[in-house]
Structures are given as C-alpha cells and as structure tokens.
Amino acid sequence: MAVTPDFHYTRSQIVTEAQTNPWKRQADFDAEVEPDDMAETAARYQRAAAEADDAGELAELASRVGAESGSRDGASLVDDEGLIRMTTAELDTPGVEKVVHGLQKAMNTAIETAERVSTLIHDGGLDHEVGRHSADAVDEWNDCLAQLEAQRPPLGTTYRVPAALPAVFVTDAGGTVPVPPVWAGATFDFQLTQELHDRIRNRHLGKAATTAVRFDGEVRDEIDAYRHRLSGFGRELSDDGYDILGGPFQLLANPEMARYAADGLADELAKKHPDRTRLAEYAAVLATIRERIFAPDDEISGPGDMEDAVRGSLTEQERAYLVEFYGALSPETLSGLGRDLFEEAAGIGGGRYSGWEDDGPSLYATGRDVSNGLLMLMNEGIGGLDLANWMGENGRRDQDLVPEAVGALAPDPGLDRQPVPRASLDASLDFGTLLSTSTVPVGDEFRLRLDALGEETAGRQHDEDSYYGGKYAEWDVSYDRPRGYEPWNDQYRWNTPEQRLAHEYGDPEYLDPQDVPEWQVREGVYGLASLFDRRLPENWEFGRQGG
C-alpha cells in the first residue's frame, strides 16, 4: 500500500516536541496588555487629568470616568502608527502633566511590545518558519521519489520473484537507505516506505521544535525587557504621587508583574554581589501598598496611635499582587534574605552587599518591604488571607492561597500533616530575622503560627549544630565584653530596653533598629523583634499588639 505523505505540523505537535509554547505566551501577553483597548483607557485619563487637583487624584478620577466616554473619545488619541498621543497643553496642575506623560510612555511601551511579540509569532515569524520546515520535508520526500523513479525498471517489465529485481537505494538527509520491493498485484514494484516517511517527518518536526524554542526565547526576552521598563515607569509615577495600584491602567502592578518582580528578586539575591538598587526596585510595589494602608512611621509616636495607624485595607488588585509575588518565592529565597540581613548586620557578610553605608537603598529597607508585604498578605484584619475561614469563597479557601514558602517556614500548628515539607531549624531562624524588620502589625491567625514556631525554636540558635550556634560562640570569645554588649555596633550600645530608649530614634531605613523605642517593638509597629537582638524566635511574642 502506497504511503500517503503528511508533513503538516500542528501547534500541539510542535509544543509537545519543544516542551514550550510560544503561541500561548504571545496570546497571554496580548490578553494582558489588551492593546486594542488602550485608546479607551488613555481617553479616560485624558478627561481625568482636566479635573484632577493633583497627581494623587488621577487614578481615582480615571476610574470614575465612564467607559462609554473613553470608547467615544479614544480614537482621537491614536496616531497613524497606532500609538497614544494624549494632549497636555491645557493642563496647569502641578505634577499632573508629568504623570500623564509617564502614563503615555507606559501605554505606548505596552502597545509596541505587543506588536513586536505578535510579529515574532505571526506576520513572517514563527508561523512562517513552521511552514518552511513543512515545505522542506515535502521537498525531501519528493527528492526521494525522484531518485526512486530514476531507478525504477522500464515500464512493462514484470518480475515474478524478488530475487530478480535490481537493488534500489535512495538518499535523504539522514543517509542512504534501501527501498524494498513490494507485491503490486501481478508483479513486484518499488515504493518509498512508511519508515522513511516518518524519519523525514520527525527530523523536520524536530527542526520546527528547535525553531519554536528559539522564538519562545525571543518572545520571553521582549516581554522581560518590557517588564523591566514598565517597572521603571511605575517607580517614577509612584514617586510623582500617582497611585500605580489604582485606576483603569492596570499593567503596572498586575499578577504578571508580581511574578516578574519575585523572580527578579530571587535571581538578584542569588548573585555573588546583589545590586541593592535592583532589589529595592523589585520590592517597590510592596512598599507602595504599605504606604497606602498604614500611616507613615514618623506619625506613630506611641501605643495609642496604633488603632489609627490603619488607613485602609487591601484591594482585590493588591491582594492578587501579593498572592502572586509570594507564591513565586521559594523558602530558600525568603530565609536566604533573612540570613543576608543577619550577616550584614553582624559584619560577617563577606562584602556581598558592598557600600552598606553609602547613600541609596539599603538591604534592610528591602528586607522590611518584603517582610511587610508578607505580613499584610497574612493579615485577615486588612483584607489579607483569612486562615480561619474554612468555607472559602468562589470554591477556593484562603488556606489554598497561602504561599508554599510560608507553609514550609511557618507551618500550620493545627495540622498533623503539613501540605509542604517544613524547612530546617536554621531556615526558620533566618525567616524570623526577615520578619523582624517589619513595620506592620501581625494578623491574629498568622500570629498563632509564629507563636508555635517561636516556642519550638526558642533558644535553639545556641545549638551547636545550628549555623547561629557557631556565630554566637565566636562573638562571645572574640569580644571581651559583658554579655549585654553588641560588639558590631559603632557606639557599642548595651542591649537592654533602658539603653535603647536612651538613644535618639533615627531613620529606620539606615539606622540600627535597636534605636526604635521599645514600645514600638512591643506594640507590633516594628513587627516581631529587633533584627539585631539575635534572640529572635524568643521575642516573636513582641509582635502582638498590646502584648
């Protein structure tokens, strides 16, 4: 039976072979950006800008502007190249014009990237290359047919036994193969085999898969470059007073950007010498969320202010961002950041974060932002995950949204069997160091986990088999000081509440958190304990408000 050639490759066949899906990546990005709707969004900001008293109002006003008006006015804001051109000539409100220009740049970056990514897949991109591989396979098959025809016996020649047939060979890209005779009714004949067909087909399918992997990498690079640029726009807009988590332009802090920021943070921390500025950039949205929900640190002067410190609750977008961000972080990343904080504070970090005293973002500030974001996510009192709600909404419980890293580092004490393997003792101690930098209260339900973990690990940082056990021994031997001394402190302060309160309270972003008044540690403003206290797990109860 003659072979029916089939050299058409479906996307699913290529995806299975390539183990990656550039078509889906492009479609997901297009759905995220929605370039066709960008003009409508721009029109709503255009109208809002005319009414805003300052940049801080722009997102809220743009949300109020009806979608119908945006749809009606949007076409006039698109130029011949399909880019947004918002007019600001009549704007005289300080800051608003600058924010409008920043939003326009962000929108056009999204539109241009979506176009480039689409071109990589369609319009002469991957789809064209897949078609070329199919055509190459057809050409190779046809060449083998031509070779066979050139060797076929003259028309009318009849062979009753195979032994009388001449030897026939064809050569494809994989080498030379014999063509066996087949019985064709009244005589023997020659036909290309199914095996040869499959060999040609699979070879070009492999080439198509290799091409798909290459294009997927190019698409990924385009999207990563876009996210890097967009995060920069987000920082600038936030610095100018714009609420990047509000308004109809949702691309600055969506779940996809959250995963990008988390991956970037993890990759940067894994480097031999992490860049502190890049770390601060990846944690910037976390800081923005904290600023919106809680009062600034300098406005909290005593325990009586704690009740008024909460100014809002997490929006759906903010909560979704936090879920994605911490869901993308591993236990090793969170505990590793805590270990870096400990070593840098103790002066034993080996210079990984050189320039600690220089101007610019500090590692402590990044740790604080990451810790704050996690505690906000785990605080049901401000709209975070409600660990006590076992019924769930929309078929999904909040417990199912708890990041795996949190489940490993701070397991649920109420479960005999944990959903993920728990972390080591040292990792839990490192996690405690990270949480100690927080400047937000701890949620009631999550506090139960931390209390249980604190009881389990209390005092164990002195264990000989603990990383910290050796470090404490070294300090006790190296410094001929009373036990209350902090040897790495520039002024050699005493580690007692009375001594701490005797010192001036300075900027927590650059200053030793021991300078924070004791009531702030006790009331939970500064979270769970002083980073430099060292007896971290024992002091986790300080995270309780009013405790």
Image (cartoon, rainbow, N blue to C red):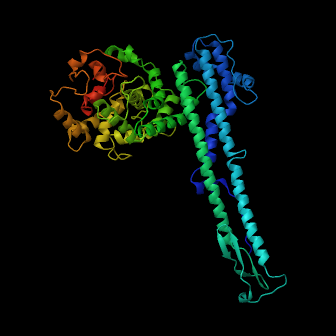
- Is residue 546 in view? no
Residue 543, visible in the rendered structure: yes
Left or right, residue 282 beside residue 103: left
Q: Is residue 194 above or below residue 25?
A: below
Residue 69 in the image: state x and y as whole percent: 71, 21
- How many dots with numbers? 0
**Quarter location, residue 522:** top left
Query: Which quadrant: the C terminus?
Result: top left
Q: Write the residue at 44% across / 18% down.
A: 311
Q: Is residue 544 above or below residue 2?
A: above
Q: Quadrant of the N terminus?
A: bottom right
Foreground of the two, 362 or 524: 362
Q: In this rendering, is residue 256 above or below 171?
A: above
How far across and how far down the image is residue 355, in percent? 38, 28
Q: Quadrant of residue 340?
A: top left
Residue 169 image position (x, y, % from top left):
70, 77
The part of the image, by quadrant, that contains residue 198 is bottom right
